[in-house]
Amino acid sequence: LLPVPSIAAPFRSDYRMSLGLTTAVAKVVSDFDPTIVHIATPDILGFQAQSWAIERDLPVVCSYHTRFNTYLKYYNLAMMEGLLWSIFGSFYSKCRHIYVPSYTVRDELSEHIANMRPDALKFWLRGVDSQLFHPMRRSREWRRAMLGISHVPDLETNTQAAAAEEDAAAEADGEVEEAAAAAEAEAAAAAAGAVAGGGG
């Protein structure tokens, strides 16, 4: 990690806004000799890092997981949304890949950034591995020793709760599948009736 100059955001003092890529940091990155550059935020630092990479013919990829346009509405700056998307367009159109967490975010970017390559958007799903992080793997001793947590619920209770949630989810999925099958059968029967009626 390399620190860069930053200031507190006007509306959120706990959020820092970078002021750009310094010569010293650029030299360290250049000495590191990367083969690809990943940028998380299209701020001043992000734009300068992108320019730095493009000048050296390095591929630039980015991740888009914060919907900054919704912040404008929250801070009563919705009138600036068009300008924001224009800035985003100039940035993301130069990225080889843009990694998004969901279909909703993908569709939003596709709608607002016209000059983006159709194959640029890629999914970067960051869910939790339910097998790796399963209640059965819980360790009272580790929690007490490493985290200082004295009270740990019984493993049996946690396992039963997890099993109940899985059963409820499976039941809900089954009900959805049954409803879809019924609707499909009803549509097919109606279509068949329409054909029969037309033939008579």
Image (cartoon, rainbow, N blue to C red):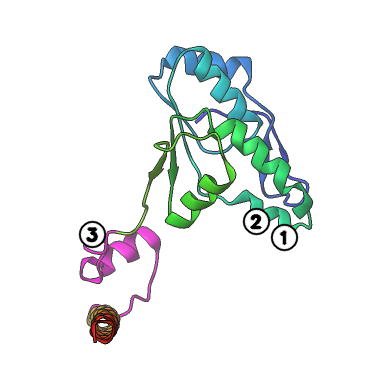
- Mark 1 residue type: Tyr
Q: Which mark is residue 70?
A: 2
Please say whether residue 130 is one of the residues in the magenta stretch.
yes
- Circles 1 and 3, Cβ within 8 Å, touching? The answer is no
List the single residue furthest toward the front.
Answer: 200
- Residue identifier under label 3: 132
Residue 35: % across, % down: 38, 19
Screen quadrant of the C terminus: bottom left
Residue 196: % across, % down: 23, 85
- How far apart marks 2 and 3 lie (CA) works out to 34 Å
Question: Badge 1, how many Cα within 10 Å: few under 14, some, many 20+?
Answer: few
Does dot 1 land on a helix, a strand or a loop?
helix
Does dot 3 land on a helix, a strand or a loop?
loop
- How far apart marks 2 and 1 lie (CA) works out to 7 Å
Residue in view at x 21 percent, y 63 percent: 131
Residue 187: % across, % down: 29, 81
Compared with 184, 57 (above or below) is above
- Circles 2 and 1, Cβ within 8 Å, touching? The answer is yes
Compared with 182, 35 (above or below) is above
Span highlighted in magenta in the image = 129-155
- Between 132 and 137, the one nearer to me in the picture: 132
Q: Which mark is residue 180?
A: none
